[in-house]
Image: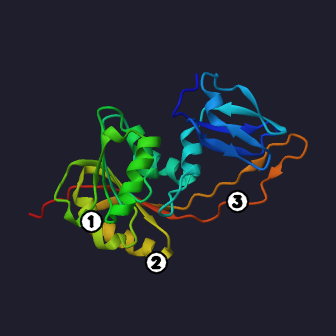
Amino acid sequence: MIRPGDRVVILLEDEETRFFAEVSEGKVLATHYGNLIMSSLVGMEYGSFVSLGFKGAYVLKPSLLDGILSLKRSTQIVYPKDIAFITLNLDIKDGDIVYEAGTGTGVMTSVLSRMVGSSGRVVTYEKRSDFVRRARENVAALGKIDRVTFFPEDIENCNEENVADSFFLDVPDPLAVMGRAVSTLKGSGRICVLCPTTNQVQESIRRLGELGVVDIQMWEIMARNYKTNPDRLRPEDRMVGHTAYLVFGVKIKRRSRS
């Protein structure tokens, strides 16, 4: 049942247009099809049919993906196609301690907080306090904020070592803080470095090897959506092309020399 404060997806009957909105008193979803008084949805069941001006629409419970794509962004976000591959390769599970730098808009933080479970923890660093404020709001809406510790500072100020099961590094200059990131990892802990350019990939691969990271891999994830008209099935006219290069590795304990 829909309650005040819930967020919903309004999907038009033709299934080609959707709106993401909050159910609250005095809020109106204004579209070029017509307006919808959001408080009128209170008490309805998800999946109900409503009128949106001269169009019909369904009221759906939003997914995490709906929430991510509707965010007001303070930074570039990690795209869903990359998020899924990152979390799988970092092997994030219930009870894990996951470190992140930087927090940005909080999309990855939200996803990680849902994956670590009630006994896990996400520790995230972000230098810009204005980004942290927006990220807190987004994680509160999309994730499990009670599982997240925010540090409004540079990851270089972190003095924790051998505590993290995995680390997600997404900062403009990953080389500058890569040593600090790797030092937080436990033995066999996993790291992902997000790189927008190939020269950063080359430098990251070299540096990770120097820091005692093995099984280094680099991936670029491509995805293409299709128009789901059974009579005219074909790709969408637009697609998200390159977003980032993903560099993964596993930390080892170096052998002592006799």
* Image location of residue 229, percent across then percent down: 85, 42
Q: In which quarter of the image is the N terminus?
A: top right
Q: Distance between the residues labelled 2 and 1?
A: 23 Å
Residue at the spot of label 3: 239
User: Which of the pair 145/31 is nearer the observer?
Assistant: 31
Residue 169 visible in the snapshot: no
Q: Residue furthest front?
A: 26
The mark lying in front, picked from 1 and 3, is 1
Find disc 2 in the rendering and name its residue. 199
| Residue type of the residue flagged with mark 2 | Asn
Q: Which colour scheme is used?
A: rainbow
Is residue 28 rendered to the left or right of residue 111? Answer: right
Residue type highlighted by circle 1: Asp
What residue is drawn where x is 43% and y is 74%?
A: 200
Q: How crowded is mark 2: few (under 14 residues within 10 Å), some or many (20 or more)?
A: few
Q: Where is residue 240 in the image (x, y as percent from the top left)?
A: 65, 60
Give the crowd class for mark 1: few <14, some 14-19, many >=20 residues within 10 Å: some
| SS state under label 1 | loop
* Residue corresponding to mark 1: 154
Residue at image position (22%, 59%) is 183
Task: Between residue 110 and residue 20, name the one nearer to us.
Answer: 20
x%, y% of residue 228? 80, 43
